Image (spheres, helix red, strand yellow):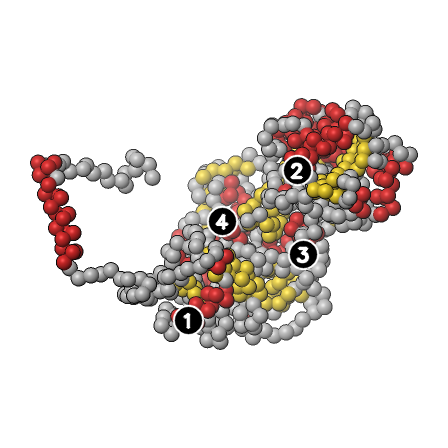
Amino acid sequence: MRADDPAIRWIEEPKLGLSGKMYLPLIFQGLTTTARHLVGPKRTVSFPEQRPNIADPLIYRGVHRLNRDQEGRVKCVACFLCATACPAHCIDIVAAESPWPDREKYPEHFVIDELRCIFCGMCEEACPVDAIELTSLFDLTGRTREEMFFDKEKLLSVFDQTKDAEPPKSAGLPPLQRPEEEHHS
Amino acid sequence: MAKVIVDGKEIEIGDDERLNGIQVARRAGVEIPHYCWHPGLSVVASCRMCLVETGTRNAETGEISMLPKLVPACQTPARDGTVFVTQSEKVQHARAFVEEELLIRHPIDCPICDKAGECYLQDYYFEYGQPSRRADLRPFTSRRRPVGQTVTLFVDRCVMCSRCVRFTREISGTSELMIVNRGNQEEIDVMPGFPLANKLSGNVVDLCPVGALGDADFLYHQRVWFLKRHEGVCTRCATGCSISIEENQNRVYRLKPRENPHVNQWWMCDEGRYGYHHVHDPSRLRGASRRGDDGYEPIDWHDVPEDIERRVERSDSVACVVSPHLTVEEAYLLCKWIRQSKPQASLFLGPVPVMGEDETFPGGFTIRAEKCPNRRGVEEVLRHFTSRVSTFDEALEALDASTFDLVWVTGGYLGDWIDEPTAARFGTASELIVQDMFDSPLWQRASLRLPGAAFAEREGCYVNADRRLQRAAWAVRPPQGAWPEGHVYWRLLEQPGMYRAQVVLDEMAEQIPCFAPAAGGVPPLGVVLDVAQPVQR
């Protein structure tokens, strides 16, 4: 964006009056806020003894999970759209032909670098089969960087852990149907 | 000069040019969408995507009379006074209907389709289709069957443009593919027991405007929008097809032909197309080493130039075998340096691999028997430094007479290029410097081993069988521990910075008369050099 872009609206800083120049009213205003919080109800949580209350886990953007379909297989079709949408380039997928007759393609490897991830949720938005979702798990720790590369098994295990508390956000599309193949060669 | 009017704009075309509506519109900067038409194939006008309004202008009165119905632009020749209207409401309606009809039977499994991202159906629907789909059809998975070793057919994705069928009939001349059934049951197929198995089979995948024909070699490995293209030259035979090397994160995923009317038109052979796997072969040689008292000891690459200098310095007679796999720049630098250090050094052309006979297909595409990219270029460089080009056999004969103290051999060949008895003849030289990609009997005898680069890692020019000099850019970095040959020579000559092939080529254009056409850069389609006839073997 250039400085002479017509879309930019330039505004002037308001001029300070006498009270503003003295600063005193503003100092009192600030101190009033502090005092109000001193006597008000406590909102601080003693983490980790006490867990914070997540208002809506469905929109919270925590650790990823890879959903399973009805048969317990990974739902992902390895289309790479999450990796394409990812602004942090933290998703690495190796696609392969699926071992199942009703599916064409599946992820042989699916690794998310949770340290690199910025938890923006674009992968979830991009997924055409609702296979990748962000859970409300937020306290993510590990001793090494390697531990924080979450592979397919780990991401599926996150699903197993969280599926009861947070059911998949949408049922997703039913599995794609393949027309009958008549064999003649 | 014939004048054609496209969307009210007058376009002049040459009198001997035979263009159709699509081509002439392209000159006017208008893209007419099309599936079945391809400049290299016959016209069938079956997809109906290129329908336009057309008419003629009366040369005397200047009055334009339009045809009442739409005609396919691919089948309409552009003559003097022909009028094309490509953007009218009528045309746009026709395009939207064609798109709608194609999408009625399309699986729309774009997320798992390898063509997504370079698919004409995707692009054209986005550009010309209706905003929403009227048919109440759900996406489904395409039926799939292999039609040959290299190509997989996704039956339901096909738009029946018949480009692949025409390719096998007109260009490869093998006619494996055909259309079975009629109407909405139409399918591409092969006869049972006669799979698609010709040496150009991979081209049908390039021709397919949608994802119906999948390359078994590339299938599911990478999405096309991740790939970065680098202009290259195929090095598998002396034809030297123009190709683009497509890579992501330093890994080559596929090679595609690049249109070059002087060399390969739109095609390339399967040997070249699938002949890139050696680039990532784990058995590639890595790490420079020299023979010490007890076996080979590793040597830092930055000490290599000095080591070579020392070895050459203490040798009385020096010979250099210049491989036809080197680029002309690399060959020039090597010869230049060795002649600077030892003006009497002998220069030989490396072995030229020849397999079978030249094979020309009905479409005019030729696969050469000479399986190296740059014999003519290297010969021309050698001719600049020596009066005549000496062959590899002459080098062996001279070696038998123990003529040389030091021999420097450049390789870059694929497969077993040198056998044990031949390599043993190099035993008469006390020093043997070898630059190569893979282990060989010669490598086992070397006193200084320098792992070299593969074609996708080299930068420089090749001169093909028709004496056309083409430029190739490097696409991927060589594996750790291997240095491109040019880089070694660049260091030897104490040139500043990184190896830059263009600088060398500019110098060559000044020094060697026949390289003069390459002065000031090589155009994308290459330039024809004035190269003398090859030496007789």
**Counting residues from the N terminus, which is met first, the one under dot 4 or under dot 3?**
4
Give the Cα distance between marks 2 and 1. Answer: 52 Å
Local secondary structure at mark 3: loop
Pair 4/3: label in front: 3
Nearest the viewer among A99 and A46 is A46
Local secondary structure at mark 4: loop
Label 1 resides on the chain identified as: A
Pair 2/4: label in front: 2
Q: Could you tell me residue B294's position as x and y percent?
A: 78, 44
Name the amino acid type tagged 4. Answer: Ile
Badge 4: how crowded within 10 Å, few (<14), some, or many (20+)? some
Which residue is labeled 3 in the image?
Answer: B201
Name the amino acid type tagged 3. Answer: Ser
Name the amino acid type tagged 1. Answer: Gln
Marks 4/3 in contact by CB < 8 Å: the verdict is no
Give the Cα distance between marks 4 and 3. Answer: 28 Å
Badge 3: how crowded within 10 Å, few (<14), some, or many (20+)? many
Give the Cα distance between marks 1 and 3. Answer: 49 Å
Residue lying at 48% horizontally and 59% vertically, measured from the top left: A147
In the rendered structure, find residue B301 and report the number of the disc placed on it: 2
Badge 1: how crowded within 10 Å, few (<14), some, or many (20+)? few
Marks 2 and 1 on same chain: no
Marks 2 and 3 on same chain: yes
Which residue is labeled 1 in the image?
Answer: A161
Name the amino acid type tagged 2. Answer: Trp
Q: Quadrant of residue A57?
A: bottom left
Label 4 resides on the chain identified as: B
